[in-house]
Structures are given as C-alpha cells and as structure tokens.
Image (cartoon, rainbow, N blue to C red):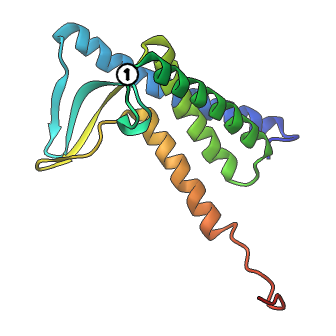
Amino acid sequence: MLKNNKKNFLLALLIFIIIFAFDRTSKIYILNLAETDKYVDIYVNPFLNFHLIWNTGIGFGLFSSEENFYYNLITVLIFLINIIIILLIFKSSNSSFFFFVMILGGSSGNLFDRIYYQAVPDFIDLHYGYFHWFVFNVADIFITIGITCLIIVEFFYNNKKKPNNEKI
C-alpha cells in the first residue's frame, strides 16, 4: 500500500508519531510522579492501579535478566525486528499496514526506553481481586492490538480456500 502512495506514507508517519508521543507522554507523567513521591502506586478503581515497575525483559516482563549480555541481545533483536516491521509496512497492503504501524509505534517507544533508561517503565496494573495481570504500558497496548488485528486479518480475510480439484 505504501509502495507508490505518498499520502499513505504520511498517514503511517502521523500514526507512528501519535502512538510514540502518547506512549512517551504517559511514561514521562508516571516517572515525574515517581520523582516527586519516590514510589508510584495509585488506586484508580477496583480493577486498575498505576504501579511503576522497571522491566528489563520483553513484553509483560518475560525474559527479564540482570545480565547485560542478555539485555543487550534482546535490545538488538528488538531493533532488528523493528527494521523488519518497517519493511513489512512498505510491502503490506490493505489494512495490514496500519497494524504494522501500530506495532512499530509501540515497539519504538519501548526500544527508546531500553536505550535511554536501560529498562522499560511499566505501570498499568489490571487486576481482579488478588489476581493481577502482568504490569504493562501504553506501548504494549498498541503492540498487542496490532498483533491481534494482524492475526484476525490473516485468519478471517486472507485465508484462501484450496481449489476443490486438488487431490490429497
């Protein structure tokens, strides 16, 4: 879709900037609260708290490690995946390109934090009673929505049936 269409490129760039800015703004707000109060644990409602933690792993704290080698390896892999996503944006068609842009915007926000802070600030704590989901951030929301939408598009819209004359 972006191959020869300057308008779609500018739209993708605008979506990317909005997602990146929204993620950065939310993280800066929480980090400013942490500077003031030294600890962030804000009750919002019975299902949502803002609780700052520092994530050295990937999404939802998976593969967290204190060793620099593993942290740097994961950071390089995320950078390479972002390059692949950029290539997919330029080669994609239909609505898929919007979902790749969403993933890139969120991933770039987290990559920025990994490089600047050496960890990603996560602060959205969804819970029900004593069951708490992984703490996450705004970038993770856009990454998850983008991936989920790509899966839905692949299963329901891009899944072509085999011709009936094909023998098994």
- Residue 79: which quarter of the image? top right
Residue identified by numbered label 1: 27
Q: Residue furthest right?
A: 4
Q: Which is more toward the observer, 120 or 32?
A: 120
Question: In this picture, is 55 found above or below 36?
Answer: below
Q: Where in the figure is residue 57, as x and y percent of width and height?
A: 41, 30
Rendered residue at 82%/87% (across/down): 166
Q: Where in the figure is residue 4, as x and y percent of width and height?
A: 88, 40
Q: Where in the figure is residue 85, as x and y percent of width and height?
A: 67, 38
Q: Is residue 160 left or right of residue 55?
A: right
Rendered residue at 37%/33% (across/down): 137
- Confirm whether residue 11 shows in the render: no
Q: Amino acid at mark 1?
A: Lys
Give SS at disc 1: helix
The C terminus - image quarter: bottom right
Q: Where in the figure is residue 82, as x and y percent of width and height?
A: 64, 32
Rendered residue at 20%/46% (across/down): 127
Q: Which is more toward the observer, 69 or 96?
A: 69
Q: Is residue 108 left or right of residue 6?
A: left
Q: Is residue 69 left or right of residue 124?
A: right
Q: Residue furthest top?
A: 36
Question: In this picture, is 12 found above or below 17?
Answer: below
Rendered residue at 27%/25% (across/down): 53
- Confirm whether residue 4 shows in the render: yes
